[in-house]
Image (cartoon, rainbow, N blue to C red):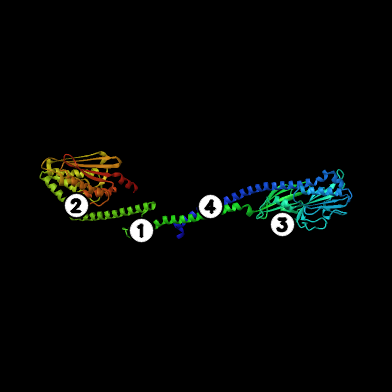
Amino acid sequence: MKFRSIRSRLIQFMLLATTIPLLLSISITYIHTKETIKEQSLEENKHLIFQGKTNLGNYLDNVNKASLVVYTDTNFLRNLRKIPDDYRAVAEVYTMLQNIQNTVSGIERIYLHATQSNQSTLVTPATFPKRESHSEPYVSTRPFEKYTTSVEPTHKGHDYGFPPSPASYSERKVFTFHRTITNIPSEEVLGVLAIDVRLDAVAAICEQLFNKSNEQLLVVDQNSSIIYSGRDEQIGQKLEDSVLLEHIHQEQTSGSFENGGAMHVFEKMQTPYTEWTIIKRIPDATLYERANQLTQINTSIAVIALFVIVFGTLLISVRITEPIKRLTNYMNRIQAGQLNVDIDWNSRDETGIMFTRFRQMMDTINNLILREYRLELANKTNQLKALQAQINPHFLYNTLQSIGTLALQNNVPRIYALLSSLAKIMRYSMNNNDALVTLRDEAEHVKLYLDLQKERFDDQLEFSIELEPDTLQVPMPKMILQPLVENYFKHGMDTQDKQGRLDITSRMRPNGILEIIIENNGESIPSDELNRLNRQLERQQGGVPAEWTDEDGIGLHNVLMRLQLYTEHESVLYISNVKPQGVRITVEIHTQVRHAEENNE
């Protein structure tokens, strides 16, 4: 039962209503951000690699142009054919090679072998030029003699067979630019030129293309040899990644692909003397770092929001369910018979209104129970008095009939008429079977009563009963009018000064209100006494027990009480004085309330 409570359902609903949208929002944001960052990063790196390819190509073109100087100087080609003893020719060769070395930065050494004079020359920045006789070019240059120009992959530098000098950096890694010198336009080979280039210039260009701490960059030639790498141990080795080789050996000059948890971007650099490919590897952790950071921030915010929502949900659920629990406790105590429960809950929200209405309902129920108890006690008392006063209706009727027959036998018809009126009055008042009668029946009963009073007062009493036709069939409680008329003879009629007058009228007002006015010309009620009577009537009409005294009698009290029971406290009764003398009693009976009850039944 605990999991079916409003509190648990509210918590579950709030958690589902917040967790699912938050998770969906975080997931969608992460995916969208990831794709956006991927596209932006891919586009940026393509432009970056393309710029690196351009810079590397320009650098190699400078080396190539520097090597072409041998063709622009005709003396240099003639000097290659001269005998080794021509020192002037040798000096010019040295000068030409040193000029090539100084033209492009990063040249480590230049090796030249003249095939006709069988002389090899080595020029380095740190030593004086060297010249020796060799019948063949150095072995490392022979594979490249068949090409006009070509680039040897990165390797450890060497002195091309010359004795090493103390200032030689033969262990430094270089790549070599090979050029075969021919006697243009013929294909006669005059010599072989090899230019060793340090990786410094290439590294300076490549290091601008990637972040060494979390990215990797490779420069690979057409034979899968690694020219440059961010990892020194890979330089000069063969590339073994088959997936990577498969992509870069395709015909497309640039592209990108994902493999091994990383994004790879490549750009091919195609020249007449070599084909290098620049490959940049970006791990997913680096590529999506910003997306992950944004996701972590969103997740942190979501967790905080969930804690706030859970706390707020618990607070709200307690605020909602606690009044219900307390109200249930009050109901259980009331069900056990404790009708005087002190309902204590002070709040300005809807729960406070609910407790206020429940408190008012209990007050109304207690008042109704008290009133019903008093009404039942009054009915029992009245029944007891009626039983005490009731002799035997049949005996009384038979006695009055016998007296009436005797009056007829003695030629006194007036006495017979009066006895008949009295018998009808008694029969009407003592018949307990009919609680409701029409206004016509009630008026006929009052007329019989007034006929007897007129016989008593003779010419000192005049009365009239004028009822509108649409009021005659209106139902009403029995014995309403006679107690009100009787008050005139008890308290207001003055038989000494002038003739008494009593008028009864009726009419239907809007909203189904039957208005009956009983007006007489008797003594007016003193103002303080009139105010007191009306206050008592207002209290009783408002559901507050009125404090009637013995001097007031029970006529007004009983009449108003039965009218309110009949119309659910909607009917009213009030008294006023008439100028210059007299009293007016007005009765308003709300007939629509009773009709609504009968229709519901």
Q: Which of 260 and 537 is in front in this view?
A: 260
Q: How far apart are marks 2 and 1 (CA)?
A: 38 Å
Q: Position of residue 349 (x, y in %)?
A: 39, 51
Q: Earlier in the sequence, mark 3 or mark 4?
A: 4
Q: Disc 3 residue type?
A: Asp
Q: How far apart are marks 3 and 4 (CA)?
A: 47 Å
Numbered tag placed on residue 116 in the rendering: none
Q: Tag 2's secondary structure?
A: loop
Q: Is residue 600 in view from this perspective?
A: yes
Q: How far apart are marks 4 and 1 (CA)?
A: 41 Å
Disc 3 designates what residue? 232
Q: Is residue 413 in view from this perspective?
A: no
Disc 4 designates what residue? 22
Disc 1 designates what residue? 330
For this view, does 318 lie left or right of residue 460?
A: right
Q: Which of marks 3 and 2 is nearer the N terminus?
A: 3
Q: Position of residue 394 (x, y in %)?
A: 18, 52
Q: Earlier in the sequence, mark 2 or mark 4?
A: 4
Between tags 2 and 4, which lies in front? 4
Disc 2 designates what residue? 549
Q: Disc 4 residue type?
A: Leu
Q: Distance between the residues labelled 2 and 4?
A: 75 Å
Q: Residue at x 63, y 54 (%)?
A: 285
Q: Nearer the viewer, residue 38 or 25?
A: 38
